[in-house]
Amino acid sequence: MRIIIFGPPGAGKGTYASRLGRELKIAVISTGDIFRDEIKQNTDLGGKVVEFVKSGDLVPDEIVTDIVTKRINMPNSKRGFILDGYPRNVEQAKSLGNITKVDAVILLIVPDWIIVERLSNRRICKKCGAIFNLKYLKPKRPGICDKCGEELFQREDDKPKVVRERLNVYEAQTRPLIGYYRDRLPILNIECNSVDIPPKVIVDKILQELQKLNLLG
Ligand code: ADP
Ligand code: ZN
């Protein structure tokens, strides 16, 4: 199964993608996570992308497409994959079309106020990347990851000024992809109208919809 999970920043793409990946035993390819890792490890790639990521702008298409191509061709993507954060503009969508076939797009539909609440209260584990929310998905011990006991931190680009830029970029470049895919792929509309829906509920909805398309085998 090859799917794209799509939606505005803060829609929960990362949270749902990692759960779906586990559930379906397929790879999760998250371009944002890949970049954050490379930046943390001070690699050449990290150096090339850090300024874009810090300011909330898109990393140049060639860099992103190159990485995604490599990941898709890795053995652990053989059973399938979920793309989280790619494609992010029409150019990338066209490139993806040349790399691989995709079965469906999961479209997360989330009102603006929820996005703001999610992003401003989001905290992430330094070590394992688990995602928490200070108001809606609280860690059991404040500031500490439930899964591995490490400290939580706020992403630099979750600070208000950069959030605004990411939302602008989404509206201008990424949202138009919905129109692009409308006549090309099945789109699963997943509505998230309440800020504290447990991730499991959304993941189950997604699985139901994938089942309806006969993608679960
Ligand atoms: P978001 O919560 O905004 O969806 P991500 O973790 O997906 O955040 O991405 C973080 C940053 O990484 C983006 O703001 C952008 O700078 C960069 N990035 C991630 N994916 C892409 C992509 N497909 N094309 C260009 N830049 C990307
Ligand atoms: Zn952790």
Image (spheres, rainbow, N blue to C red):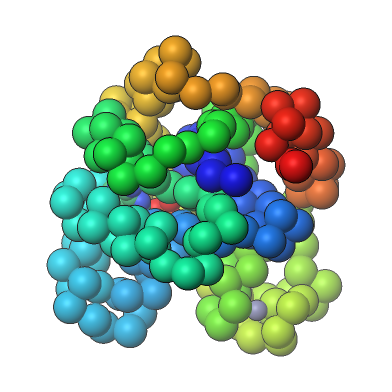
Residue 107 is left or right of residue 100, and the answer is: right
**What x and y, as percent, mark residue 50?**
23, 66
**What x and y, as percent, mark residue 70?**
32, 63
On screen, 190 above or below 150? above
Q: How many labels does the image show?
A: 0
Quarter of the figure with the N terminus: top right
**What x and y, as percent, mark residue 133?**
68, 57
Is any part of residue 154 visible from this angle?
A: no
Quarter of the figure with the C terminus: top right
Residue found at x 56% / y 22%: 186
Residue 112 found in image quarter: top right
**What x and y, as percent, mark residue 118?**
61, 46
Residue found at x 27% / y 32%: 94
Residue 121 is left or right of residue 157, and the answer is: right
Q: Which of 133 and 83 is in front in this view?
A: 83
Residue found at x 76% / y 76%: 146
Residue found at x 24% / y 73%: 46
Is any part of residue 72 visible from this angle?
A: yes
On screen, 130 above or below 159? below
Residue 125 is left or right of residue 40, and the answer is: right
